[in-house]
Every structure is written in structure tokens, then in C-alpha cells.
């Protein structure tokens, strides 16, 4: 999001097991916080993967909070995130395998670019 809260977008890049690009998805989220936007990006990725028949998902995100919560290392305390976390867990339970990794923002630049495109497209 641009500001916290602020106008937000979600961007997801789908890659094969070698890191080659397969597809992308992005969505405008309206006014929300950075943490909610991260969870909405996760949900966008999980829902798209499920729709496209994905059964094994490795999710890389630049939100340490989101990664640690999904790994069970941090508790989900925020009421704004609890419902999103539960929805994510429901979608994850339908997969054969799921992993989440925290990566630094420079390793997630394409997803960030897509999230910004979602915001820019609405403001044109």
C-alpha cells in the first residue's frame, strides 16, 4: 500500500520449479494497510493456483510478519488479519504441499511492480 493505510494492490508471479515465469495476477485492493495487502496477495495467489490446478505451492513474500505467522512462529493477534489468516489456512489445507519463505524486497520486485500496476490502473 502507498501509505499505511493507503491505496493498495496485490501482485503475484507464478514460476516453475526452476524460477521460470509462468503467469502473473494482480488486483486493486482499495484503501488498506500493508499487512492486509500482503494477506490479500497471498489469497490471490492461492485462489489462482487452485483455479489453475496447482497442488504444490511455495510462496515467497517480502513480509516477515506474514511468513512467520504462516510458519506458526508468530501468533496472529490483529483482528484485521485473523479472518484473512483463517481463509488462507482453509485454502492451504486443500493443497498437497505448501511452503512460505520470507525474501527481501529486491527479490520480490516483479510482484511489487504488479501491485503498483493495480493501483496505477485504477488511478488513470
Image (cartoon, rainbow, N blue to C red):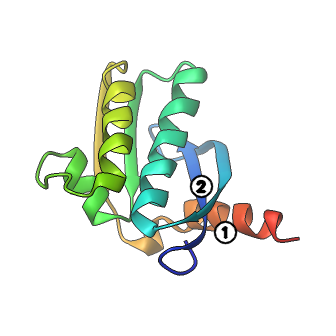
Query: Where 23 sits versus 118, above or below?
Result: above
Residue at 65%, 46% in the rendered image? 24
Residue at 58%, 78% in the rendered image? 2
Q: Name the residue under label 1.
A: 116
Q: Which residue lies furthest to the left in this view?
A: 73
Disc nearer the start of the sequence (2/1)? 2
Query: Where 26 sits versus 23, above or below?
Result: below
Decide if residue 44 is on the left or right side of residue 114. Answer: left
Question: Are discs 2 and 1 less than 8 Å apart at CB?
Answer: yes
Quadrant in the rendering for residue 86: top left
Which residue is at the front of the view, 84 or 45? 84
Q: Mark 2 points at which residue?
A: 11
Which residue is at the front of the view, 19 or 75? 75
Query: Where 99 sits versus 113, above or below?
Result: above
Decide if residue 72 is on the left or right side of residue 29. Answer: left
Name the element at disc 1.
helix
* Residue 6: % across, % down: 57, 74
Q: How crowded is mark 1: few (under 14 residues within 10 Å), some or many (20 or more)?
A: many
Which residue is at the front of the view, 73 or 13? 73
Residue at 32%, 18% in the rendered image? 96
Quadrant where the image shows the N terminus: bottom right
The CA distance from mark 2 to mark 1 is 8 Å
Quadrant in the rendering for residue 14: top right
* Numbered badge on residue 75: none
Quadrant where the image shows the C terminus: bottom right
* Residue 111: % across, % down: 57, 59
Amino acid at each position: 500500500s502507498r501509505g499505511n493505510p493507503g491505496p493498495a494492490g496485490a501482485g503475484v508471479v507464478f514460476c516453475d520449479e526452476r524460477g521460470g515465469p509462468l503467469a502473473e495476477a494482480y488486483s486493486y485492493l482499495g484503501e488498506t494497510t500493508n499487512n492486509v495487502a500482503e494477506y490479500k496477495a497471498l489469497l490471490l495467489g492461492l485462489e489462482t493456483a487452485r483455479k489453475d490446478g496447482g497442488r504444490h505451492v511455495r510462496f515467497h513474500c517480502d513480509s516477515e510478519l506474514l511468513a512467520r505467522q504462516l510458519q506458526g512462529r508468530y501468533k496472529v493477534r490483529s483482528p484485521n488479519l485473523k479472518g484473512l489468516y483463517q481463509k488462507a489456512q482453509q485454502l492451504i489445507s486443500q493443497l498437497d504441499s505448501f511452503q512460505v519463505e520470507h525474501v527481501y524486497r529486491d527479490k520480490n520486485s516483479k510482484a511489487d511492480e504488479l501491485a503498483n500496476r493495480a493501483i496505477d490502473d485504477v488511478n488513470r
